[in-house]
């Protein structure tokens, strides 16, 4: 029986976030999400989508001159076939990023996949969905992301970093909710905190219109 996945879109663009920001990247956006963050910018990925087999997906991405792939959503880990997709991509010698919301265990994710875990701050409304046991399945190549909407979010993030010694585990990314928090304000908080954080913006939203789909 063929492994199938429900896919919202597959597209080729500039990676807008993570340590790989600025690089060409193929995005595979899986359909469905178990969270409803207040600032979500991909609500169109909650429903619908088209059915693809693993072979269909590989055929599609081979059209692009790129070896960096991000699997994202929605929440890609909701679909059983996501693990098999990652395994297949690794076997095909792609560098694979997994963008996941921090609410689903990651113990089955292949070791070579770079996990970007987006733990939810209080302003998202999804803070209680965070699974901190995910930390046991991270390695130094993985990344933790915190999206900041206000000062409460920032202070909460710093507390979590110190409580769980996150800065000794892997790269920590911090970014503002787009359009809700001034970049200079957040940058100042980062500088004043004395904590080793990588400040980032959603680069793709500054290259193309913020509400453009498929870039």
Image (cartoon, grey):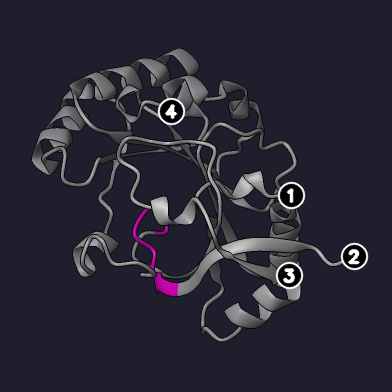
Mark 3, residue position: 54
Of marks 4 and 3, which one's residue comes earlier in the chain? 3
Q: Residue at x 51, y 84 (%)?
A: 65
CA distance separating discs 3 and 1: 12 Å
Above or below 158: residue 18? below
44 left or right of 156?
right
Element type where label 2 sits in the image = loop
Q: Is residue 184 visible?
A: yes
| Residue 127, percent from left and from top | 42, 23
Mark 1, residue position: 80
Mark 4, residue position: 167
Of marks 1 and 2, which one's residue comes earlier in the chain? 2
CA distance separating discs 1 and 2: 14 Å
Q: Which residues are magenta?
A: 12-20
Residue 2 figure quarter: bottom right
Quarter of the figure with the N terminus: bottom right
Residue 187 figure quarter: top left
Is 202 contained in the magenta span?
A: no
Element type where label 1 sits in the image = loop
Residue contact at pointers 3 and 1, CB within 8 angstroms: no
Mark 2, residue position: 1
């Amino acid at each position: 029986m063929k492994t199938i996945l429900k896919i919202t879109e597959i597209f080729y663009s500039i990676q807008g976030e993570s340590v790989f920001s600025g690089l060409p990247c193929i995005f595979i956006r899986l359909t469905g999400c178990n969270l409803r963050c207040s600032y979500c910018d991909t609500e169109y990925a909650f429903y619908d989508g088209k059915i693809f087999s693993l072979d269909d997906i590989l055929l599609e991405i081979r059209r692009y001159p790129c070896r960096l792939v991000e699997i994202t959503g929605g929440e890609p880990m909701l679909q059983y076939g996501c693990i098999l997709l990652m395994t297949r991509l690794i076997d095909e010698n792609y560098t694979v990023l997994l963008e996941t919301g921090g609410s689903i265990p990651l113990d089955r994710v292949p070791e070579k996949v770079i996990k970007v875990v987006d733990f939810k701050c209080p302003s998202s409304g999804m803070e209680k969905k965070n699974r901190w046991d995910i930390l046991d399945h991270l390695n130094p190549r993985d990344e933790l992301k915190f999206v900041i909407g206000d000062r409460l979010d920032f202070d909460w993030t710093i507390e979590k970093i110190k409580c769980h010694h996150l800065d000794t585990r892997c790269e920590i990314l911090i970014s503002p909710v787009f359009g809700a928090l001034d970049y200079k304000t957040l940058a100042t908080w980062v500088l004043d905190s004395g904590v080793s954080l990588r400040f980032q913006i959603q680069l793709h939203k500054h290259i193309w219109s913020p509400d453009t789909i498929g870039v």
